[in-house]
Image (cartoon, grey):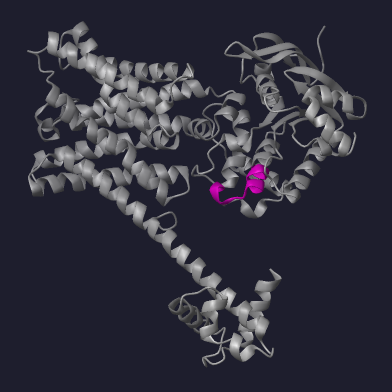
């Protein structure tokens, strides 16, 4: 690996970690789309800030972007308060408006400046190490400095306000009743989302920013039942997805941000399929086990009720089960086999007979 | 004159989009009582509780908690919101939810520690949920979730308990368990106010009642104000018939 490659991966890992932390709260607050909205509407703030400071690389542009992120949130909520638009529609109304005003302003007044729309839309992490900055005698890509700073702020706020964020996310009313201002926390969180989005998308583009904010937390949500574990897992998944995305792009010789965004989707899909309890596979297995258990119980109760009666020979044979219990012949055979495997009915098949433990099990079912 | 009532509501009017939800409500809740708020849907029962807790701004009138504004008396009041008001898929355990009741006393920045954990365990035991402390909250039944909410209010160790429909969608056993905890609280001299739906159980569970339908129709001891006439005024003609055929209170 060349130092250049290492630096790109460090930047991507920092972006992934910084995005995952606020992303967890966006997912839990069902505001995932807000990151999408903010990542687009910040363009408006960047352009306005550019007109004020007249310098494309000024850090003040980030402040402008963060402000327009907060403006987005405020506009969305103001629209919501009218009671005439739903939340998703409100977001869909606000961000294209701010984004397109930004695009128009660039086209009209800033065409000859380095604020071209391609970079704004896609970002180019491959070039990030070229833009360097020296602090305390250490020369590193500006992206490393910036994203470390943002990650530090996000971590610090999370550690300071962990309990407050948890409460106001889970139960806004109690948070308010106990004197924690949910509105303040909400806007603080949205400011963090805005700053992170802006800092990150300068390097990796808005699509990867949204992917890193939403997919890793959504995957972690399926894997754990504790908030701090969800936060830690989100960071881990995000970092792994970003770095594997880098190598995928490297192998395929394609766009890094696009490959990394794809990897976040791959990791989410893996979690969706294979999460131990909430994954689709686990659910299917649970359903199958339930179906088997119920079939065996029905079989046992049926055999039990006809045991020792005159009709036992006809009732308790395999062929009769298909009519009586509305089973397909293959399923009836399978059910008998499951019960035999558990030692609940005897190995002989005509007529089917309960073992002692099968009789006890049938009685337990009946007494339930 | 300084009111010493735990809850003193005076000329309270609350509006939503310029429609009155509560209209000129007066209410004094004496200490050590177990009071029901009853009324039809849209009568403003939840609004009254939320306004008392400072969650909604009154258009007019005021609320005093032991003679002061709610903001000064937060520590005195515990709140049990409606169970449906939160997302039970949130990644957290029953014990953790109960510990949230301690957050108010801890204030900003301070983290819950061993003492809060112990208090939360004790509260779970009081509602018969000690075996479910580590359980993820989405895996609890509706009744168990309601008990967790009650336990969370108990760790607040407040003098006033405000509950929004604690019996909504719970089984008979849970309802009994909750009522017995509420009666314990009253026996300790605490004041409990409950938004309630089942008129039949009012005389059995509560000693005071507020009949509310935007206006306060009547408030006082159940024996005095929970009359067929007041119920008819509160609910309109339909319930009058139902009560005639059923059991006239």
* Quadrant the C terminus of chain A occupies: bottom right
Residue nearest the observer in this picture, A111 or A127: A111
Which corner quadrant of the image does residue A119 belong to?
top left
Residue at left 38%, top 25%? A89
Q: Is residue A303 magenta?
A: no
Residue A10 in percent (x, y) is at 20, 39
Q: Which residues are magenta?
A: B136-148
**Magenta segment, principal secondary structure?**
helix
Residue A290 in percent (x, y) is at 51, 66
Residue A170 in percent (x, y) is at 52, 35
Which corner quadrant of the image does residue A245 belong to?
top left
**Residue A191 seen from this side:** yes
The image shows residue A212, relative to residue A290, as above or below, that is above
Which corner quadrant of the image does residue B35 belong to?
top right
In the rendered structure, the answer to whether residue B187 lies left or right of residue B196 reads: right
**Residue B32 seen from this side:** no
In the rendered structure, the answer to whether residue A56 lies left or right of residue A315 reads: left
The image shows residue B247, relative to residue A116, as above or below, that is below
In the rendered structure, the answer to whether residue A361 lies left or right of residue A6 reads: right
Residue nearest the observer in this picture, B64 or B42: B42
Residue at left 69%, top 90%? A308
């Amino acid at each position: 690996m060349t130092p250049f490659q290492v630096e790109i991966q460090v930047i991507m890992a920092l972006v992934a970690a910084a995005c995952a932390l606020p992303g967890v709260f966006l997912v839990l607050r069902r505001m995932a789309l807000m990151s999408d909205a903010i990542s687009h509407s910040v363009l408006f703030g960047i352009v306005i800030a550019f007109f004020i400071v007249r310098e494309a690389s000024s850090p003040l542009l980030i402040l402008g972007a963060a402000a327009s992120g907060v403006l987005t949130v405020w506009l969305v909520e103001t629209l919501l308060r009218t009671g005439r638009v739903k939340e998703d529609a409100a977001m869909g109304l606000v961000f294209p408006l701010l984004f397109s005003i930004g695009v128009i302003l660039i086209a009209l007044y800033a065409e000859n400046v380095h604020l071209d729309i391609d970079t704004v839309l896609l970002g180019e992490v491959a070039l990030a190490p070229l833009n360097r900055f020296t602090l305390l005698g250490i020369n590193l890509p500006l992206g490393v400095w910036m994203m470390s700073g943002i990650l530090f702020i996000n971590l610090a706020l999370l550690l300071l306000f962990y309990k407050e964020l948890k409460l106001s996310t889970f139960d806004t009313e109690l948070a308010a009743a106990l004197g924690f201002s949910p509105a303040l926390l909400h806007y603080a969180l949205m400011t963090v989302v805005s700053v992170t989005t802006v800092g990150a998308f300068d390097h990796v583009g808005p699509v990867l920013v949204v992917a890193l904010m939403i997919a890793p937390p959504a995957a972690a949500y399926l894997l754990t039942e504790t908030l701090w574990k969800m936060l830690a897992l989100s960071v881990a998944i995000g970092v792994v997805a970003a770095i594997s995305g880098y190598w995928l792009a490297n192998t395929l010789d394609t766009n890094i941000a696009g490959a990394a965004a794809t990897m976040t989707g791959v990791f989410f899909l893996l979690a969706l399929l294979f999460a131990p309890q909430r994954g689709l596979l686990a659910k299917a297995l649970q359903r199958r086990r339930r179906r088997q258990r119920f079939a065996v119980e029905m079989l046992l109760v049926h055999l039990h009720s006809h045991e020792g009666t005159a009709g036992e020979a006809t009732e308790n044979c395999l062929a009769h089960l298909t009519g009586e219990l509305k089973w397909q012949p293959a399923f009836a055979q399978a059910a008998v086999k499951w019960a035999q495997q558990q030692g609940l009915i005897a190995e002989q098949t005509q007529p089917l007979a309960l073992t002692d433990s099968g009789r006890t099990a049938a009685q337990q079912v009946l007494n339930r | 004159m300084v009111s010493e009532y735990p809850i003193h509501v005076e000329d309270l009017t609350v509006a939503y989009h310029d429609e009155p939800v509560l209209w000129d409500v007066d209410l004094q809740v004496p200490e050590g009582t177990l009071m029901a708020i009853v009324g039809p849907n849209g009568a403003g029962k939840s609004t009254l509780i939320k306004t008392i807790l400072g969650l909604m701004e009154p258009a007019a009138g005021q609320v005093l908690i032991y003679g002061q504004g709610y903001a000064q008396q937060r520590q005195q009041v515990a709140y049990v919101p409606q169970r449906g008001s939160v997302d039970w898929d949130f990644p957290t355990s029953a014990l953790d939810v109960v510990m949230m009741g301690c957050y108010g006393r801890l204030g900003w920045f301070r983290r819950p520690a061993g003492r809060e954990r112990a208090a939360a365990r004790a509260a779970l035991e009081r509602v018969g949920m000690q075996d479910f402390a580590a359980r993820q909250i989405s895996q609890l039944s509706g009744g168990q979730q309601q008990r967790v909410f009650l336990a969370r209010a108990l760790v607040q160790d407040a003098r006033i308990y405000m509950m929004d429909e604690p019996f909504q969608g719970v089984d008979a056993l849970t309802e009994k368990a909750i009522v017995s905890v509420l009666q314990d609280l009253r026996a300790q001299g605490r004041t409990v106010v409950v938004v309630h739906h089942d008129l039949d159980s009012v005389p059995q569970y509560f000693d005071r009642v507020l009949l509310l339908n935007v206006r306060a129709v009547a408030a006082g001891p159940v024996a005095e104000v929970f009359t067929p006439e007041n119920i008819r005024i509160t609910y309109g003609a339909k319930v009058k018939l139902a009560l005639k055929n059923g059991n006239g209170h």
